[in-house]
Image: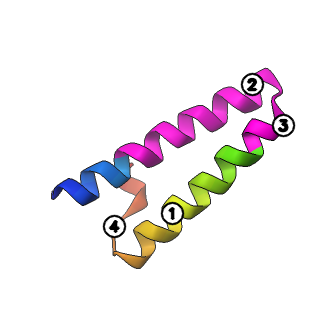
Amino acid sequence: MDAFTAGLLQRIKTTQSDLSKARETGDDYLADVEQAELEDLQRLAAEHGVPVSAA
């Protein structure tokens, strides 16, 4: 696995965790921000053929 793929998968994992925490604490604004970030990362992964299920 190259550095780009590893870094992208780590960012996705971190963002998923941050999104869960935002939802658990009821921070709707932060949840929206994290959801948008996650969608951007998933789009980037798809564009580069990185399987997100590995995250």
Q: Is residue 19 left or right of residue 52?
A: right
Q: Position of residue 54 (x, y in %)?
A: 35, 53
Q: Mark 4 and mark 1 in contact (Cβ < 8 Å)? A: no
Q: Secondary structure at mark 1?
A: helix
Residue carrying label 2: 24
Q: CA distance from mark 2 to mark 4?
A: 29 Å
- Residue at the (74%, 40%) spot, across then down: 31
- Residue at the (65%, 33%) spot, across then down: 20
Q: Does the magenta portion include 23?
A: yes
Of pointers 2 and 4, the one earlier in the residue sequence: 2
Q: CA distance from mark 3 to mark 2?
A: 10 Å
In the figure, 33 relative to 47: above or below? above
Q: Secondary structure at mark 4?
A: loop
Q: Residues within 10 Å of mark 3 (few under 14, many from 20)?
A: few
Q: CA distance from mark 3 to mark 4?
A: 29 Å
Q: Secondary structure at mark 3?
A: helix
The amino acid type of the residue labelled 2 equals Glu
Q: Does the magenta portion include 49?
A: no
Q: CA distance from mark 3 to mark 1?
A: 21 Å
Of pointers 3 and 1, the one earlier in the residue sequence: 3
The amino acid type of the residue labelled 1 equals Gln
The amino acid type of the residue labelled 4 equals Val
Residue carrying label 4: 50
* Magenta region, main secondary structure: helix
Q: Mark 2 and mark 3 in contact (Cβ < 8 Å)? A: no
Q: Residues within 10 Å of mark 2 (few under 14, many from 20)?
A: few
Q: Magenta part of the protein: which range?
A: 10-31
Residue carrying label 1: 42
Q: CA distance from mark 1 to mark 2?
A: 22 Å
Which quarter of the picture shows residue 45? Answer: bottom left
Of pointers 3 and 4, the one earlier in the residue sequence: 3
